[in-house]
Amino acid sequence: MRKALLVFWLKGYEGASLSDIEGATGVARTSLYNVFGNKEGLFYAALERYIEATKRLYEKYLKKEDIESLEKLIDAYARSEKLGDVGSWGCLMLNTITAADGVSPEAHRMIEAFRTYAIQKIETVLKAAHSNGEIVDSSINCHAWTEFILVTMWGAKAAIRHAGNTRAALPVANTLSQILRGLRTAQRIATIEKV
């Protein structure tokens, strides 16, 4: 499954031929069909595996529900060089929804379910940071900020895919982290002004 996932990640659903998948996995197409039904079924299984791995990244970094943990997630998301060559392939979900041939209803449903999950996780962090006093600006719309953060993170992945290297995402990730640190700075300034 991992090898099939890598083929889809690099080449996309349409670009990945069954011959490519057979060559990468060492499994004959008849065996693949017996397990997954067809190429589409194999792709959905690979996409699900990718989504679950991305969720684990969110779970790992967003345990503390503070701005620093969110910065760590953004850094890990953008600095995917630990993945080796695949780190320069962008995001399988983003690659799928922006493919020239469009996205199937099932793939759209799977990716939208992840997007909903990611929004919930990030928004929970922002709300916790707001309620614990880390963010004191009451005008902050946590949901709008969440959408901004997620779209920016996906944009960083698009830059990686376009440039073919993880360095392309660093200016975006660094700027987003500075913006988030600014929310905490605003809190410190407000505290100093009260004294």
Image (spheres, rainbow, N blue to C red):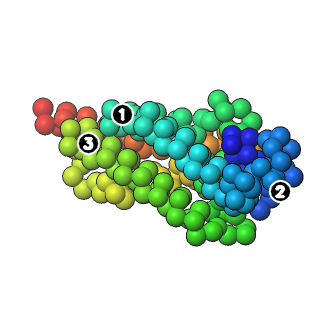
Quadrant of the frame with the C terminus? top left
Give the Cα distance between marks 3 and 2.
46 Å
Asked whether the residues under the numbered discs 1 and 3 touch, taking CB atoms below 8 Å apart as contact, a structural biologist would say: no
Residue type highlighted by circle 1: Lys
Expressed as whole percent of the image width and height from the top left, the position of residue 177 reads 46, 39
Q: Nearer the viewer, mark 3 or mark 2?
A: 2
| Element type at mark 2 | loop
Give the Cα distance between marks 1 and 3.
11 Å
Up-down: is 166 above or below 51?
above
Q: For residue 80, which quarter of the picture?
A: top right
Expressed as whole percent of the image width and height from the top left, the position of residue 189 reads 25, 37
Q: Which residue is mark 1?
A: 63
Residue type highlighted by circle 3: Ala
Between 44 and 164, the one nearer to me in the picture: 44
Q: Nearer the viewer, mark 2 or mark 1?
A: 2
Q: Nearer the viewer, mark 1 or mark 3?
A: 1
Asked if residue 183 lies left or right of residue 5, the reply is left
| Element type at mark 3 | helix
Q: Which residue is mark 2?
A: 17
Tell me, for residue 128, which label it has, or none.
3
* Residue reaching furthest to the top: 82
User: Is residue 177 visible in this depiction of the protein?
Assistant: no
Residue type highlighted by circle 2: Ser
User: How packed is label 2: few (under 14 Cα within 10 Å), some, or many (20 or more)?
Assistant: some
| Comes first in the chain, label 2 or label 1 | 2
- Residue at figure coordinates x 43%, y 50% from the top left: 118
Tell me, for residue 40, which label it has, or none.
none
